[in-house]
Image (spheres, coloured by chain):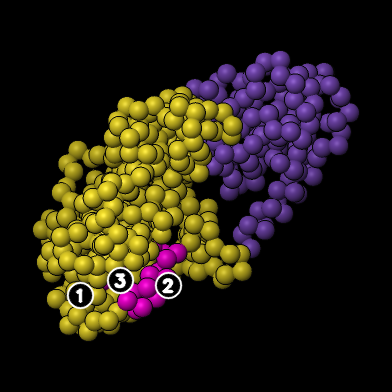
């Protein structure tokens, strides 16, 4: 994601903390964010084996309230928010009227009349305008990003570390569920969600407590080997987990069906933005399909590299890079559905050199106890 | 980061390569600043033996987890040796960029090309300026 150089760069409440820790900083979606502290490989490894702490306060929050809150959420998103119980979250897509992505998001049901949407940093203002534009319901949307900081505690030891700072019964919080509780004396929404393929939590709280919680969490996790992690490791972790990134696998030109996200595309829930287009696409079939691939030599197929099959260019790599956990080079790309079978050989053009790759199953990495999708 | 000791007998380019000349043969690598900017190096692609390379032109790439970086040759000449260590241990570029992780050796076509490159003092000042720009 790039932002015009003229736009003022945004900072989270932890910006000076990251710089003090010696983080390498990067402009991500208009935000000055830590790319890495000790190194992407070390951070990636910590999250897979122990735990990592991420500042993800750049993520946007949009709150929808009112008697018609559910109606508005149902109209603009493709998953079925009516299925949520209070304290449950779901992955979903914010849809255009063409059934493509304005953004992908997490929908949290706080009450029958109150939903918290967590959206991508670079999209939050567009998302908010889109929701307001389509609000013909008895509901009110608030662009609440500035009222929240968000930290992600991810990895097999995340629960144990977070539990040291809260009396909330974290064991009772199932995957894609959340509770309200006090962490280190700070009121938080504590969600068992994440973007790494590991167990973990994402906590939302008042930004004024950012430095306190960051410091307390790092302190609580030190003996368990938790380290601060940046967006570099967040990207290698989510790629291994086969998760989509807006602007790469999904955008305003791709539909959930093309992206392999049929499971969030609930055409049976009633009409929503883009549902007619999606129903037609489901019936007629998609023209391109997102697949995972592994490189067959040492070269790395990266974002944007052309993909061809039998000499004909068929698409581009959406995300690609080394997989630190699997010790091979992986990526995702769109190919025609008739060429999407597992085992199909594809060619990736790397600076003019045709390099072989093979379509393999997504996700690339699955933790041993994979929780159910909601 | 503690200040790096850039060897006094090397010369340096603005693209952050170093070159060490011994007689008619030069050894080329990337600097500590370059490896730090790249982050964890995972793949190095080097030219074939006997390849003719030209000053200012790319002769290979060093790839980190996040990015690909072209390596530009400080001089013209013929590649006489490539560092085989790096195909199995590319992380050496992070660990010892000025030593064990040299990239290639070149038989110099024109030894005079070297004299136009920065010495260690000039390069150190150049890097200090870059680092200041970044933290501003």
Query: In front here: A69 or A195?
Result: A69
Give the structural element (helix, strand or loop) at label 2: helix
Residue at image point 72% right, 54% down: B129
What is the number of the mark on residue A360?
none
Residue at image point 82% right, 37% down: B117
Q: Which chain is yellow?
A: A
Q: Colour of chain B?
A: purple
Q: Which residue is mark 2?
A: A125
Number of numbered labels in the structure image: 3
Q: Is residue A36 left or right of residue B113?
A: left
| Mark whose residue sits in front, 1 or 3 | 1
Q: Which residue is mark 3?
A: A205
Query: In front here: A313 or A66?
Result: A313
Where is residue B126 drawn, in percent x and y?
A: 75, 49
Where is residue A116 drawn, in percent x and y?
A: 26, 71
Q: Which residue is mark 1?
A: A71
Q: Are marks 1 and 3 in contact (CB under 8 Å)?
A: no
Decide: few, some or many residues near mark 3? Use Cα within 10 Å; few <14, some 14-19, many ≥20: many
Q: Please report whichever mark, 1 or 3, sits nearer to the chain's N-terminal start.
A: 1
Task: Tell me where residue A205 sits by quadrant.
Answer: bottom left
Q: Is residue A87 left or right of residue A292?
A: left
As drawn, B80 above or below A60:
above
Residue B15 visible to the viewer: yes
Query: In front here: A9 or A152?
Result: A9
Q: Chain of mark 2?
A: A
Residues shaded magenta: A114-134
Give the structural element (helix, strand or loop) at label 1: helix
């Amino acid at each position: 994601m790039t932002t015009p150089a003229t736009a003022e760069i945004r900072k989270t409440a932890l910006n000076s903390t990251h710089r003090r820790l010696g983080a390498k900083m990067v402009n991500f979606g208009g935000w000055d964010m830590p790319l890495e502290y000790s190194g992407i490989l070390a951070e990636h490894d910590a999250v897979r084996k122990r735990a990592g702490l991420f500042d993800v306060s750049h993520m946007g929050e949009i709150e929808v309230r009112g008697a018609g809150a559910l109606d508005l959420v149902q109209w603009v998103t493709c998953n079925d928010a009516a299925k949520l119980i209070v304290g449950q979250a779901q992955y979903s897509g914010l849809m255009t009227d063409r059934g493509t992505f304005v953004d992908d998001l997490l929908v949290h049901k706080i009450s029958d009349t109150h939903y918290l949407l967590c959206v991508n940093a670079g999209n939050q203002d567009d998302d908010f305008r889109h929701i307001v534009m389509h609000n013909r319901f008895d509901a009110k949307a608030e662009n609440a990003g500035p009222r929240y900081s968000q930290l992600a505690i991810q990895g097999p030891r995340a629960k144990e570390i977070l539990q040291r700072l809260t009396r909330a019964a974290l064991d009772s919080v199932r995957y894609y569920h959340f509770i309200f509780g006090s962490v280190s004396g700070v009121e938080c929404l504590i969600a068992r969600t994440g973007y790494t393929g590991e167990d973990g939590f994402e906590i939302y709280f008042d930004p004024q407590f950012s430095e306190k919680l960051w410091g307390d969490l790092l302190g609580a996790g030190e003996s368990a080997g938790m380290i601060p992690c940046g967006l570099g490791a967040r990207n290698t972790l989510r790629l291994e987990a086969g998760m989509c990134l807006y602007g790469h696998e999904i955008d305003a030109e791709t539909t959930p069906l093309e992206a392999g996200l049929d499971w969030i595309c609930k055409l049976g829930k009633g009409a929503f933005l883009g549902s007619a287009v999606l129903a037609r696409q489901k019936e007629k079939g998609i023209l391109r399909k997102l697949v995972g691939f592994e490189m067959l030599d040492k070269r790395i197929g990266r974002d944007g590299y052309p993909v061809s099959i039998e000499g004909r260019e068929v698409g581009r790599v959406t995300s690609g890079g080394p997989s630190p956990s699997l010790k091979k080079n992986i990526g995702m790309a769109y190919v025609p559905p008739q060429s999407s079978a597992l085992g199909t050989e594809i060619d990736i053009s790397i600076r003019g050199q045709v390099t072989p790759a093979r379509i393999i199953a997504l996700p690339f990495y699955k933790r041993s106890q994979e929780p159910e999708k909601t | 980061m503690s200040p790096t000791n850039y060897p006094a007998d090397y010369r340096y380019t603005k693209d952050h390569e170093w070159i060490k000349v011994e007689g008619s043969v030069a050894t080329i690598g990337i600097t500590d600043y370059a490896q730090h900017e790249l982050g964890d190096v995972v793949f190095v692609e080097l030219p074939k033996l006997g390849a003719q390379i030209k000053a200012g032109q790319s002769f290979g790439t060093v790839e980190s987890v996040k990015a690909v970086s072209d390596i530009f040759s400080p001089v013209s000449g013929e590649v006489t040796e490539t560092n085989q260590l790096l195909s199995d241990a590319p992380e050496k570029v992070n660990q010892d960029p000025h030593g064990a992780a040299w990239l290639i050796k070149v038989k110099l076509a024109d030894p005079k090309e070297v004299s136009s490159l920065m010495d260690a003092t000039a390069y150190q000042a150049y890097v200090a300026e870059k680092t200041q720009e970044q933290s501003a």
